[in-house]
Image: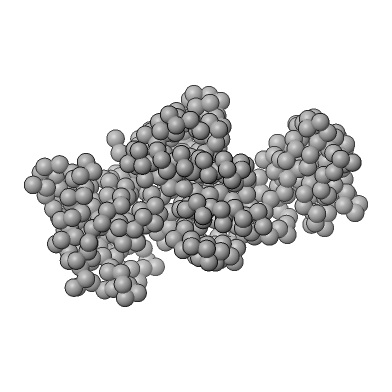
Amino acid sequence: MYKRTKIVCTMGPACDDDDILRDMIKAGMNVARFNFSHGSYEEHHERIERVRRLSRELNQPIGILLDTKGPEIRTGLLKDHQKISVKTGDKIIVTAAPTTEQNLGDASHISLDHMNLPNEVKPGSMILIDDGIVGLEVESIDGQDIHCVVKNNGEIGERKGVNVPNVEINLPAITERDHEDILFGLNEGIDYIAASFIRDGKAVREIRELCDANGGEHVGIFPKIESALGVENFDEILKESNGIMVARGDLGIEIEPQLVPHIQKEIIAKCNAVYKPVITATQMLDSMIRNPRPTRAEVADVANAIYDGTDAVMLSGESAAGKYPVEAVRMQASIAIETEKFLSAHAELKVPEHSHGTRVINNVVGLSAVNMATTVGARCITLPTTTGRTARLISHFRPNIPIVAFSRHDWAVQQMIMYWGVDPYLASITQMNASETITAAVEAAKERGYLRKDDVTVVTAGDPKTSVTLEDRITSTNVVFVAQVR
């Protein structure tokens, strides 16, 4: 069966073996995520090279996504590097100061690395440690010391993430570390950046300018929505972005967790409306870090994200550090395949209201291609594309057959990997006229096994003689053709 939802897999020790990573790609992995909160540049380089080598071996394009560390707060070092056990009602002092040999954390005191925190919190504020495993309520503030009471039993570890819900934290949009990491990634030829803790459109523009100035003009920027401010400013963030990641882990800590499902649906719907890809992430099959099978709730979570309209679903610890990375990919792929059967039956095909000008032409052509493919029982939709724009338009209409896209630009192929239902390939299809383009595209689809004798395909193309041109160099899509293989 054909899987149309894309799968993003986080790289880590669990998939450092060639055989395991090869099996993950065969099972349905489409994008490799590199979490720059962990690992050295040497480790990331080796893993990127491994992904690219196996991608070539399997003739399967794999996208490379750099996930920034972002502006975050973490706990300091602890005595003997041992976790601290705390109980409800315990008093503990949180000091906003760098860790030194003199202030290593213990049961009565820990440090955090955000110096301005005492000026931002107030009595009653909550400090959540390690994804909310331990909650500390602020009672009073004395200089750099924040006096807290423990709200639940648990353990505090060193270098653990800290969230402060409903408090505006003054952190830079792009840290020095992020700047260095992005430059490293651009030098490695990454395809996408998942930008952590983005709170407004200005932050996205900063990353775009950094990429453009360093040879990353075609790198897709996917802000991670993981704070109340990110939700509040979502429309301006989306406008500046190439796509979005719904980072539900931190989002469910920063805001009330019962609000996350509705926010997820709203974000996905807004991305769909403007044809921008969206990744749904965090704890999708979390139990498979330890167990060979997921819970029923996790299966429903993956399926519901696909029903919502997500382009991609993501594995984090499941593929990076879990016991069953291949099984997790295989499970996510099987859930996608089964869920997509029902999507097709309820697909609504219509041109979004925001479209205008040349976009209307492309939208109508894309809609026509999907309708024609359904009517004639086409095996696939075949399309040559310069930038991947047409592939994204047709993906929006969620056809129940493969969208086989060919571009002469490697960067366009890599961007299309993230699009729902699109199988992109590099091919030097010269767009001289519509007839030659269509013939070349059909032959390319045959070579890759999508078409056989007597199969029917619908082809979209741009004819330079009759088409509107975009920016005086790109021919817009204006031809839909039904072809039967002979």
- Tell me residue 318's x, y (percent): 53, 33
Q: Check the image and report above or below for 240 versus 400.
A: below
Q: Residue furthest top?
A: 292
Q: Residue furthest left?
A: 486
Q: Quadrant of the N terminus?
A: top left
- Tell me residue 182's x, y (percent): 57, 55
Residue 191 visible at all? yes
Residue displayed at 25% across by 62% down? 365
Residue displayed at 18% across by 51% down? 442
Residue displayed at 78% across by 30% down? 82
Q: Check the image and report above or below for 189 versus 447.
A: below
> 39 and 453: which one is in front?
39
Q: Check the image and report above or below for 408 versus 486.
A: below
- Tell me residue 310's x, y (percent): 43, 48
The number of numbered discs placed on residues in the rendered structure image is 0
Residue displayed at 48% across by 30% down? 17
Tell me if 134 is positioned left or right of 192 in this view.
Answer: right
- Tell me residue 308's x, y (percent): 43, 47
Q: How was the colour assigned to the protein in this rendering?
A: one colour
> 261 and 39: which one is in front?
39
Q: Residue furthest right?
A: 142
Tell me if 486 is positioned left or right of 330 in this view.
Answer: left
Tell me if 285 is positioned left or right of 383 in this view.
Answer: right
> 209 and 243: which one is in front?
209
> 79 and 124: which one is in front?
79
Residue 242 visible at all? no
**Residue 383 picture quarter:** bottom left
